[in-house]
Amino acid sequence: MPVTRAVLRQSQFLTRRTAVRHASSTSEAASKAGETASSAASKASEGLSKVSASAGPALSNAAGALRKIGGPAGKVVSFVDAMIPPTLYYSKVGLELGKLVFRGQNMAPPNLATFQSYFQPFINNPAALKNLPSPSSILARVRNASPKELAFAGVTAAEVIGFFTVGEIIGRMNIVGYRGEVAHAH
């Protein structure tokens, strides 16, 4: 028994020593990989800052020259120039909101087979586009609608108009009209 305990202790010691060696080499490799990644990221950001630094003055000079045009063209240029930042901001907000909705609803775009099966009749037979409903057939369908269908359409239209109106009121922050410049009286 004493021999087996000594062998067991020796085995445990060697196992621990090997584990410590492997752990230290793994942590060294991880730290080297982290250093490499951070140096690559710093080089990339440095290159990006050089590009933006060289492009920035050129763009600002061009925008400044366009603003000096004056007249109607200058007004259009200054209007477009003023609309760029809010447009970029709201497009980014919309994109992030869309991502949240897609993830929250577990949505996914349709695959290629779905598109092909939907558009296949139009690709094989372009005359099938003529079979789409015409305005006269839509009008005939409305004339032949039952009172229940007309009531449903009316309620849906009222809901859409109501939500649009509430959105306009919230956007204006006023019940009637928009805030604007005071009229110049002569």
Image: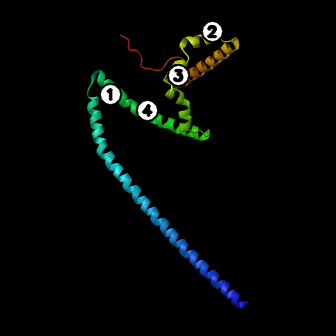
How packed is label 1: few (under 14 Cα within 10 Å), some, or many (20 or more)? some
* Type of the residue with mark 2: Arg
SS of the residue under disc 1: helix
Marker disc for residue 143: 2
- Indicate which disc, 4 or 1, sits on the residue closer to the N terminus: 1
The CA span between labels 2 and 4 is 43 Å
Q: Which residue is mark 4?
A: 87
Q: In this rendering, would 35 be left or right of 160?
A: left
Q: Which residue is mark 3?
A: 128
Q: Which one is in front in this view, the residue at disc 2 or the one at disc 4? A: 2
Q: Is residue 145 above or below residue 32?
A: above
- Indicate which disc, 3 or 1, sits on the residue closer to the N terminus: 1
Give 140 or 85, whichever is nearer the viewer.
140
Residue 8 at x, y percent in the picture: 67, 84
Q: In this rendering, would 91 be left or right of 43?
A: right
* Type of the residue with mark 3: Ala
The CA span between labels 3 and 2 is 26 Å
Q: Which one is in front in this view, the residue at disc 2 or the one at disc 1? A: 2
Residue 167 at x, y percent in the picture: 56, 24
Marker disc for residue 77: 1
SS of the residue under disc 4: helix
